[in-house]
Structures are given as structure tokens and as C-alpha cells.
Amino acid sequence: MASATTSTATTGTANRGFFEPSQYERCINRYEFGHDLVGHLSTMFEERASLEHTYVNALRAWSRKWHGELTKLTEYPSNKKVWDQIVSTGEQMADIHQTIASNLHDNIQPKLKQWKKDNYEKSIINYKKSKEFEKEFENVQKPWNKLLESIYEAKQNYYKLVKLSKQCEQQKFSMPVETPAETQKQIIDHYVQVNLDVDAARTKYQHLVRDVAPGAEPRQRYEANMIEIFQHTQAFEKKRLDFFKDIFTDYIKTLQQQALFNKMLDDYLRVLQTHNTPADLDAWYNSFGPGTQSHYPVFEECQDTIQ
């Protein structure tokens, strides 16, 4: 399976051209790596949802703790009311993050899992679609590879005969004077025949190479067929990228918690407006300060009598 979707995810050398033998495997690798990418995206959202749940539980535990603490504390009424509302924002924030977690878990995750299931169906070992792509490419490349093999064999044969021709030429010019006439004739005849073979091999080699030259009908047909299959793989990759964009767009819903944020803010501002420092101080003044009724000693006649 591939490790990237770019040209580094290839079989063979990264700078080899698409039309060269087996380089279509980059397309197969790209398709299969898409499966991993969907999995990575799903795992990322799953981890985010888990983090949100952890935060929700922590916020609610924090809110419960501090609501309880505040009931034990002695504090001015309006100050304590605002303080308690701050604790309540923790509960409201927990609700917001619970909504985020629910959207990730109930909306985004099921779509990712279903898309992965629908588009990466497996046979026993391989993905069915990757085998389909591979078979299409192989069917086009099979006759083309046969032609390339013929060219390679013709080239090797031509080079071998050229080398042999030079050896024969050297043999011909290095014959001793006393070489029998019959032997000389055989060497010369062999040299002539080898040169004829060289010409035939060169002609065959040149003829085959013409079929792969720019503008040659076999090459044009081959490249057109390869491009057609390539576009099939491009179409799937477009489908995957468009799906990812849909998921990224769905994520906007996770961020669109403005109504809940506004309510939390409005509740807090409403309670904050009830904060009244003079009233709190006056209440303390009247309940515990100079405003309280103090009792001073007065003269009291002794009421005891002698029996």
C-alpha cells in the first residue's frame, strides 16, 4: 500500500513517466492510500469527540463542586449570585461541548464509515476497485510491453552484430599473407554476410522504434487508452476529495454554536447587572455593622430583698 498520494508514492523511480511500464501503479497506490486517509480522518474526529466528552464531564464535575462550595460560603448576596452564575456557565459550556461531541459522533463519523465501506470494498485480499483499475491498465500495457520487448531484443541483436562485424573486419585485415585462398574466401564471405545481417538488424530496429516515435499511430493509440483509464482513477480521486470537502463543510455545524454561546452570555450579563456593591455593603451595615441594634448597659436597681 502506498505511503503518499504524490509522485513519491510510486513503484520504481519517482521521475519515470506515467506511460512507462508499470508506472500506472502510482494510480493504484493513490486509490488505496485514500482508504488510509479516510481512516485517519475518522480517527482524528473520534479522538476529538473523546476529548470533548472528557471536557464535558470535567466541566460538569467542576460545576457540581463549586455550586456545593458556594452554598457553604458566606458572601454578599449579589456578589454570590454572580459568582454562582459563573459556575453555571460551566454547565452551559458543557452543554455546548456535548453538542460538539454529538455532532462529531452522530453525524460526521457515520458518514465517514459508510463512505469507506461503499468505496473500498474488499475481496479476499485486495480492494475490488484497485484490481479493476489494475486489470484495465494491464490490458492496455500488455501489447505495448510486448512491442517494447521486441525493440529491446532488436536493439540487443543489432549491437551484437555490430560488434561481430568489427571483429570480422579485424580478422579480415589481419590475415597473414600465407593464409590459404579458401580460408581467405571464407573469412571475407563471413564478413560480408555479417554486414548484411547488420543492415537487416538495423532496419528492423529502426522500423520497430518508429512505432513508438512521437506521432506514430501505435503510440498515439496506446497513450490515448492509458489516459482514458487514468481519467477513471482521477474521477474516483475527485469523488474522494469532494467527499472530504463535504465532511469539512459538515464540521461547520460543529462550530456553529452561537445560539448557545449567546444564551450563556445573556444569562451571565443579566445576572451580572444585578450585582450591587452599595446594596451589599448596606445590607452588611444593617445586618452586622452600625445599622444593627446594639445593647448598652443601663442602671438597674437591685431587686433582691432581705428575708
Image (tube, rainbow, N blue to C red):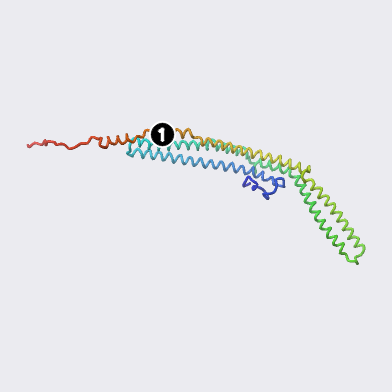
Q: Residues within 10 Å of mark 1 (few under 14, many from 20)?
A: few
Residue in front for this viewpoint, 292 or 161: 292
Quadrant the C terminus occupies: top left
Looking at the image, can residue 124 be seen? no
Name the residue rendered at 75%, 47% in the picture.
145
Looking at the image, can residue 48 be seen? yes
- Residue under label 1, please give it: 269
Name the residue rendered at 38%, 33% in the picture.
273
Name the residue rendered at 71%, 41% in the picture.
227
Q: What's the amino acid at mark 1?
A: Leu
Q: Position of residue 282 (x, y in %)?
A: 30, 35
Residue 222 as seen in the image, left or right of residue 64: right
In terms of image quadrants, where is residue 174? bottom right
Residue in front for this viewpoint, 188 or 294: 294
State the SS at label 1: helix
The total number of labels drawn is 1
Residue 273 as seen in the image, left or right of residue 301: right
